[in-house]
Amino acid sequence: MYNLLISFTVSGVLLASLYFGAGIDIGYAALAAAAVFVLVFFILSRIFIKKLTAIMQSAEKDIQAGRTEKAIKTLEDGLKYRKWQLYVSPQIHSQIGMIYYLKRDFRTAFDYLQKGFSRNWGGMGMLAICYMKRNKPKEMKKTFEKALNLTKKEPLLWNLYAFCLEKIGEKEKAVAVLEKGIKKTGEDERLKANLAALQEGKRMKMKSYGDFWYQFHLEKPGELIKQQTRAIQGHRKIVRR
């Protein structure tokens, strides 16, 4: 990373100047060089974090306006900073992969999400689902476990993992995941409700997460509308009686 290289170079030059040029004790010279290294690295990191944030915000506005291709182009342009700042490349790959996933271009999404950022739990969840759709349950589990090791407090991620486990026929494992998730998230109520549902032989209910849930394309919003319609129709029949 260029940030590290520049910081090392500046601090190294200062160390040599203080020790060999000014005759300052090596210990004091090293302390001064270390302080300068931290300062230079901090300043450079701040500069590129601001640049990356601006790119992400611009892409987000394009996505909200339905300009997904423009958003992808904006993010791809941000890859020019990948040699300057740590984790730039995986963060951008995660964002691009998520856009393709939302567009249901799962093949292209998979290629980007594989190179994505492990701390982006949404992208990791999508990657895990891609593995599930490819009949690779071991890779799916590894991906979820990796994401949960870094993001333990997100209830939706625990619910998503359990939902996928139940979907591939591993109900007992899904129950265990929900039980662990309840402990890690501080007794989350939606995790408790889904745990009870599985233990009673019922389906997990995820609709309370709204768009955050439907972005994973495991259920269609239309199914919820149909359920609500049937419920209303059933209610009307009762009223007529």
Image (tube, helix red, strand yellow):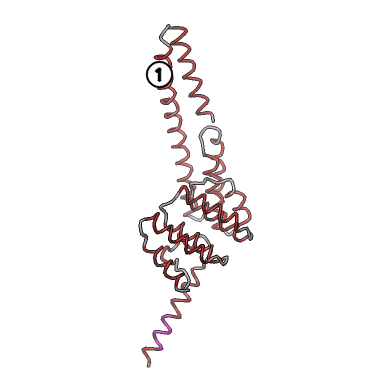
Tell me the SS state at disc 1: helix
Q: Of helix, strand and loop, which mostly describes the magenta segment? A: helix
Residue position for label 1 = 31
Question: Which residues fall within the magenta stretch?
Answer: 231-237
Residue 209, given in percent of the width and then of the height, sits at 42, 62
Left or right of residue 64: residue 79: right
Left or right of residue 76: residue 57: left
The quadrant of the image that shows the C terminus is bottom left
Q: Any magenta on residue 236?
A: yes
Say if 22 sits above or below 158 in the image. Answer: above
Say if 171 sits above or below 85 in the image. Answer: below
> Badge 1: few (under 14), some or many (20 or more) residues near its Cα, within 10 Å?
few
The answer to which of 141 and 41 lies nearer the viewer is 141
The quadrant of the image that shows the N terminus is top right
User: Residue at 47% of width from left, 64% of height from top?
Assistant: 175
User: Residue at 51% of width from left, 65% of height from top?
Assistant: 172
The answer to which of 85 and 128 lies nearer the viewer is 128
Residue 19, given in percent of the width and then of the height, sits at 45, 10
The answer to which of 85 and 158 lies nearer the viewer is 158
The answer to which of 169 and 104 lies nearer the viewer is 169
User: Residue at 39% of width from left, 56% of height from top?
Assistant: 183
Amino acid bearing label 1: Leu
Residue 50, given in percent of the width and then of the height, sits at 44, 37
Instruction: Kindly indicate the quadrant of the structure image that contains residue 184.
Output: bottom left
Say if 234 sits above or below 16 in the image. Answer: below
